[in-house]
Image (cartoon, helix red, strand yellow):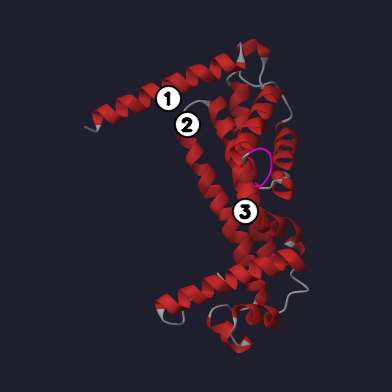
Amino acid sequence: MAVSRRRGRAAGESTAGEIRSVALDLFYKHGFQATTLRHIASRVGIQVGSLYNHITARAALLFDIMATVMQALLADQGQVAQEPDVVERMRLLVYHHVRFHGERAKEVFIGNSELRSLNRQQRARIVALRHEYEQMFQKELEDGIRQGKFLRVDVQVTSFGILAMTTWVSSWYSARGRLSLEEIADIYSDMVLRGIWTPAAGQLQTHLRRVERDNAKRSLAAAGASK
């Protein structure tokens, strides 16, 4: 991790967080190679040498930003695994993916554009995290096909297509736009499900309504049991 705790807890954490925030903004606007430690220190309002109280190196700071966003994405999506229905799990995966990438567009841009700036070991770690994330989508596609809910698509190509399409939201979404991020996430999740749903399983909307009713019943039962 690039951020350390060498100073007093409150002041150190505040400065470390500001350094990370400034670096994120500068890497996004100017690129990693064009951003120096002097630029970061100047924006934070400290001496260049003082940066080393909080970071080990500029490259370590970049790696920390890229690794942290991937870990947060994996943790966010890991909650989807609690959903028992494979169709609803895929819907939630897409929905959360769109929301996450719309909300953290700067980190997504840096992650996609600065992989080349990492050393071999750092790059291998980020690639491994990305592969772990891709596997989540591929697993749900495989489960849906096995259960007769999804078309027999090429799992790897389809998962890459879903991720590429939904990740691109980070490049054009604006909070000032016509639709909210939640509405866009709903549109994308519906589009993905319609593209992979097999008619042999019946009506997609009927299935989703049944899942919604079942989840509501489970929630009521759990609430009653906790009293």
Label 2, label 3: how far apart the Cα atoms are? 25 Å
Label 1, label 2: how far apart the Cα atoms are? 9 Å
Q: How many marks?
A: 3
**Residue hosting label 2:** 83
Q: Quadrant of residue 138?
A: top right
Q: Quadrant of the C terminus?
A: top left
**Measuring 65% from the left and 71% from the top, which residue is drawn there?**
23
Where is residue 188? Give x, y as percent.
Answer: 67, 33
**Measuring 71% from the left and 24% from the top, which residue is drawn there?**
195
Marks 1/2 in contact by CB < 8 Å: the verdict is yes
Where is residue 192? Give x, y as percent.
Answer: 68, 29
Local SS, label 2: loop
**Measuring 60% from the left and 25% from the top, which residue is drawn there?**
144
Where is residue 49? Give x, y as percent.
Answer: 60, 88
**Measuring 74% from the left and 65% from the top, which residue is drawn there?**
29
Q: Quadrant of residue 124?
A: bottom right
Name the mark on residue 187.
none
Relative height, residue 111 to residue 45 (above, below)? above
Mark 2 vs mark 3: in front: 3
**Residue hosting label 3:** 104
Q: Is residue 52 visible?
A: yes
Which sits earlier in the primary sequence, circle 3 or circle 1? 3
Crowding around mark 3 (Cα neighbors within 10 Å: few <14, some 14 to 19, many 20+) is: few
Q: Is residue 3 visible?
A: no
Residue 35 inside the magenta-drawn segment: no
What's the amino acid at mark 2? Glu
Residue 176 inside the magenta-drawn segment: yes
User: 105 and 88: which one is in front?
Assistant: 105
Span colored in magenta: 175-179
Crowding around mark 2 (Cα neighbors within 10 Å: few <14, some 14 to 19, many 20+) is: some
Local SS, label 1: helix
User: 176 and 97: which one is in front?
Assistant: 176
